[in-house]
């Protein structure tokens, strides 16, 4: 059975709203963290994935774990268990991981650590892990371009590009 589900975690509301019709048009089922009984917290979401093991085509994640050392303010930390659980739900031949980053959640350095640490769950499994920035305008038509970029990253058939960092919207011409 081919995976036709995409798990969206931590995708901001305007982008999520723009993305839903695009996913539906491609006959992709959307699972959204924080909706329909799916937990919104990364560790709880990882546990739920490990228990249910739904077949996933992709994970799109903008969630970060918040950790604090004594005397320090909490800071975002990559949710490795979420990625590890999602990889086990991807098909044996591979699937896509898309990390969303901005100034408040994961940053580029954290996403690079995720990319370096995420390993296949099956022999021969190809993981296509790319990233997209969330900072920038959320107004049409840029929001639509960002949603289309995210859909493209989540459904790359040949697992290329790999390790790319994209803005999710085109440069404005001067």
Image: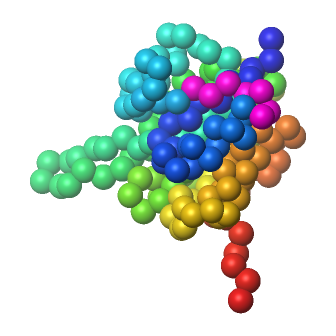
Residue 136: quadrant of the picture: bottom right
- From this viewpoint, which residue is outermost toward the bottom? 174
State whether residue 1 is above or below residue 135: above
In the image, residue 17 above or below residue 39: below
Q: Quadrant of the N terminus?
A: top right
Q: Residue most toward the right?
A: 158
Q: Name the residue rendered at 51%, 15% in the picture.
A: 50
Quarter of the C terminus within the rendering: bottom right
Q: Is residue 113 visible?
A: no
Look at the image and name its color scheme.
rainbow
Report whether residue 15 is seen: yes
At a point 74% along the width and 23% down the height, the residue shown is: 4
Residue 138's x, y, as percent?
Answer: 54, 61
> In this orientation, which residue lies closer to the viewer: 142 or 118?
142
- Which of the pair 24/151 is nearer the observer? 24
The residue lying furthest to the left in this view is: 71
| Relative horizontal placement of residue 112, taking residue 47 as reference (left or right) | right
Q: Can you give x and y, in whole percent of width and height, for residue 53 in the image?
A: 59, 13
In the displayed structure, 170 sits above or below 13; it is: below
Give the residues drawn in magenta, as a range: 25-31
Query: Residue at the location (62% across, 28% down)?
Result: 30
In the drawing, does residue 42 fall left or right of residue 112? left
Q: Where is residue 116 drawn, in percent x and y?
A: 60, 46
Magenta stretch containing residue 97, yes or no?
no
Q: Is residue 73 above or below residue 23?
A: below
Image coordinates of residue 95 in percent, x first then y, are 74, 32
The mark total stands at 0
Q: Residue at 44%, 38% (x, y): give it.
A: 79
């Amino acid at each position: 059975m081919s995976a036709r589900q995409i798990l969206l975690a931590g995708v901001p509301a305007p982008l999520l709203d723009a993305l839903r019709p695009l996913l539906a048009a491609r006959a992709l089922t959307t699972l959204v963290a924080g909706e329909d009984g799916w937990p919104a917290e990364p560790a709880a979401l990882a546990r739920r994935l490990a228990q249910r093991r739904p077949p996933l085509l992709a994970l799109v994640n903008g969630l970060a774990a918040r950790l604090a050392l004594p005397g320090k303010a909490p800071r975002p930390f990559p949710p490795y268990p979420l990625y590890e659980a999602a990889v086990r739900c991807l098909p044996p031949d591979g699937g896509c991981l898309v990390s969303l980053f901005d100034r408040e959640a994961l940053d580029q350095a954290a996403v690079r650590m995720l990319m370096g640490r995420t390993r296949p769950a099956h022999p021969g499994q190809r993981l296509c892990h790319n990233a997209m920035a969330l900072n920038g305008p959320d107004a049409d038509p840029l929001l639509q371009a960002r949603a289309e970029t995210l859909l493209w990253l989540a459904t790359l058939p040949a697992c290329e590009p790999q390790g790319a960092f994209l803005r999710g919207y085109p440069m404005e011409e001067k």
